[in-house]
Image (cartoon, rainbow, N blue to C red):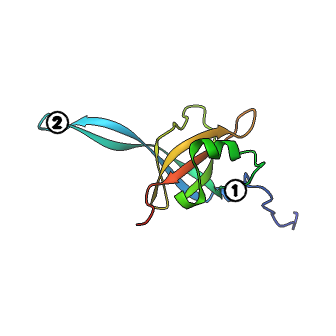
Amino acid sequence: MSKKKFASKTFLDPGRFRYNISFYEHATTINNYGDQTITDTPVMITRASKQSIQNRPGSIYSQLEEEAGATLMNGDIYFTIRFRQDWQPKKDMRVVVDGIDYVLRALIPLDYPQNYWRILCTTTQIGE
């Protein structure tokens, strides 16, 4: 039996997926009075790793950050989730991590064949 300690060397190591992340979609329901109400329904709960945006020139994601209007002041952050064959996140979904609401602004596949998604999220709770 090896006594070698596990070293977490990259952000894709399984031990880095520490956060529960919930994805919500808007759904229209009709109540008992016949009125339509829009509710957020959970569609997926999974584990994610968290990484701050860099906003430095030459970064491979700087173009994506600029197009999405991401800044550190907006509370923007990257989450990495595992790829699933039966489900894919969509832009403008509501995302909840540790009780903080985010809006999914952009998503990119990290590798080929695809095993991970990196999603750029903006918090909706600035100044609260």
The answer for how far apart the CA atoms under marks 1 and 2 are is 45 Å
Q: Which label sits in the foreground, 1 or 2?
A: 1
Q: Secondary structure at mark 1?
A: loop
Q: Nearer the viewer, residue 4 or 8?
A: 8
Residue identifier under label 1:
54
Disc 1 + disc 2, Cβ < 8 Å: no
Q: Is residue 3 above or below residue 30?
A: below
Q: Residue at x 70, y 54 (%)?
A: 14
Q: Is residue 66 left or right of residue 43?
A: right
- The amino acid type found where label 2 is placed reads Asp
Q: Position of residue 38 (x, y in %)?
A: 29, 40
Neighbour class for label 1 at 10 Å: few (<14), some, many (≥20)? some
Q: Residue at x 78, y 48 (%)?
A: 58
Earlier in the chain: of badge 1 and badge 2, it is 2
**Image spot of residue 35 (x, y percent):** 16, 36
Going 68% across and 58% down the picture, which residue do you hit?
16
Q: Is residue 85 visible?
A: yes
Establish if 97 lies above or below 36. Answer: below
Which residue is labeled 2 in the image?
35
